[in-house]
């Protein structure tokens, strides 16, 4: 009997120990692709939304390490200042600056863009990284459904306001952080903002599909300008993005070792921003630092054009 109990106790000791030893290898296996480009960005100006935490912060750190002037465009200025300070210390690059940007408020977006255009004569890389996920039904300051308003319309307006500076700085790049979840998304124009029915999981997917369609249509508009735009899936990342969902928090904690770290999740964003082979590639979708499949809904040019026009109407803007 003691022998059996001893064996059980030994197993109870060895299993956690084995898992602890295996964690780095499991994380590496599920970590996906790594950006191998050694490109330097001295003299380049970068704007990254939502760069105070998660993959945005990791992306900012990498591009700062390459010599770029990096502007962290964030809603929470206390966290943004802390992140900027940390990146300056780690990289030695003093041109890492936090600026206020609330994508749930078009006034804030316009103020950020106006100040940026006054202060910066160039913009070489715009990374539309910020996002919300699985939040209960709520509206932005301007009355847009929160997922659609922040994840799509906020970045749509920001890009519109900065596009001429990007053109003037060409070659330049726009990177839209989307998600594999776009495969579950649909653009229902009769229920675009959850007016008739709302399910927060699908609302997130719809907004990520909107990111794909925006990238596709914007690429068409930017042909011949020297500005490219691509979308990407960062992977399933252990980050604060799931803060609105208790269920996802539990699942994320249980399966944490199978999820990407923020550094791993940032690799495709970095790849799209710096890889030399992508200099003329536009309107594509990437995952794990390589081209990935887009859903059939994400390839629908008619839907992309209609969403573009509807977005312009909602925001009261007109693209040239």
Image (cartoon, rainbow, N blue to C red):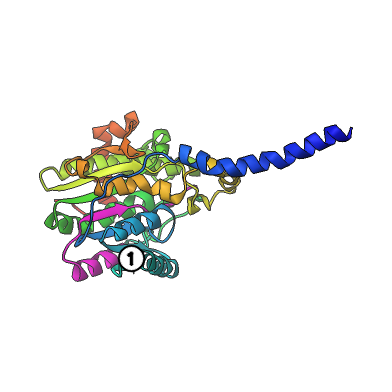
Residue 154, by quadrant, is: bottom left
Q: Is residue 116 magenta?
A: yes
* Residue displayed at 72% across by 42% down: 13
Q: Label 1: few (<14), some or many (≥20) within 10 Å?
A: some
Viewer-closest of 26 and 259: 26
State whether residue 255 is above or below residue 130.
above
Viewer-closest of 72 and 182: 72
Q: Quadrant of the N terminus?
A: top right
Viewer-closest of 205 and 259: 259
Residue 40, by quadrant, is: bottom left
Task: Report the residue marked by disc 1.
Answer: 108
Q: Is residue 36 magenta?
A: no
Q: Residue furthest front?
A: 3
Q: Residue furthest right?
A: 1
* Residue displayed at 55% across by 48% down: 245
Q: Is residue 177 visible?
A: no
* Residue displayed at 17% across by 56% down: 166
State whether residue 117 is above or below residue 21.
below
Residue 22 pos. (x, y %): 57, 40
The part of the chain drawn in magenta is 108-134
In the structure shown, which secondary structural element does the residue marked by tag 1 occupy? helix
Residue 145 pos. (x, y %): 42, 51
* Residue displayed at 51% across by 40% down: 25
Q: Residue furthest left?
A: 224
Task: Please give left or right for residue 51 compared with residue 226 in the image.
Answer: right
């Amino acid at each position: 009997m003691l022998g059996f109990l001893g064996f059980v106790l030994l197993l109870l000791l060895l299993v956690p120990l084995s898992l602890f030893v295996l964690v780095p290898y499991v994380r590496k296996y599920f970590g996906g692709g790594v950006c191998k480009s050694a490109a330097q960005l001295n003299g380049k100006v970068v704007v990254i939304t939502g760069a105070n935490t998660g993959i945005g912060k990791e992306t900012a750190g990498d591009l700062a390490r390459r010599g770029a002037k990096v502007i962290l465009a964030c809603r929470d200025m206390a966290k943004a200042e802390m992140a900027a300070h940390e990146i300056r210390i780690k990289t030695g690059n003093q041109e890492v600056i936090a600026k206020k940007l609330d994508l749930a408020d078009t006034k804030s977006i316009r103020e950020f863009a106006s100040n940026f255009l006054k202060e910066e004569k160039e913009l070489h890389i715009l990374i539309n990284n910020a996002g919300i996920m699985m939040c209960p039904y709520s509206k932005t300051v301007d009355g847009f459904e929160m997922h659609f308003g922040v994840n799509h319309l906020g970045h749509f307006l920001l890009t519109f306001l900065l596009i001429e500076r990007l053109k003037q700085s060409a070659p330049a790049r726009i990177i839209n952080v989307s998600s594999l979840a776009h495969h579950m998304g649909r653009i229902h124009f009769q229920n675009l903002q959850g007016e008739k029915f709302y399910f927060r999981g699908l609302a997130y997917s719809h907004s990520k599909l909107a990111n794909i369609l925006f990238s596709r249509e914007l690429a068409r508009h930017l042909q011949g300008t020297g500005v490219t735009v691509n979308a990407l899936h960062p992977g399933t990342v252990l980050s604060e993005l799931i803060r609105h969902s208790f269920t996802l928090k539990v699942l994320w904690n249980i399966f944490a070792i199978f999820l990407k770290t923020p550094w791993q999740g940032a690799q495709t964003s970095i790849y799209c921003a710096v890889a030399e082979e992508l200099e003329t590639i536009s309107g594509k979708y990437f995952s794990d630092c390589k081209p990935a499949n887009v859903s059939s809904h994400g390839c629908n040019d008619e839907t992309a054009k209609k969403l573009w026009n509807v977005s312009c109407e909602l925001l009261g803007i007109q693209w040239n």
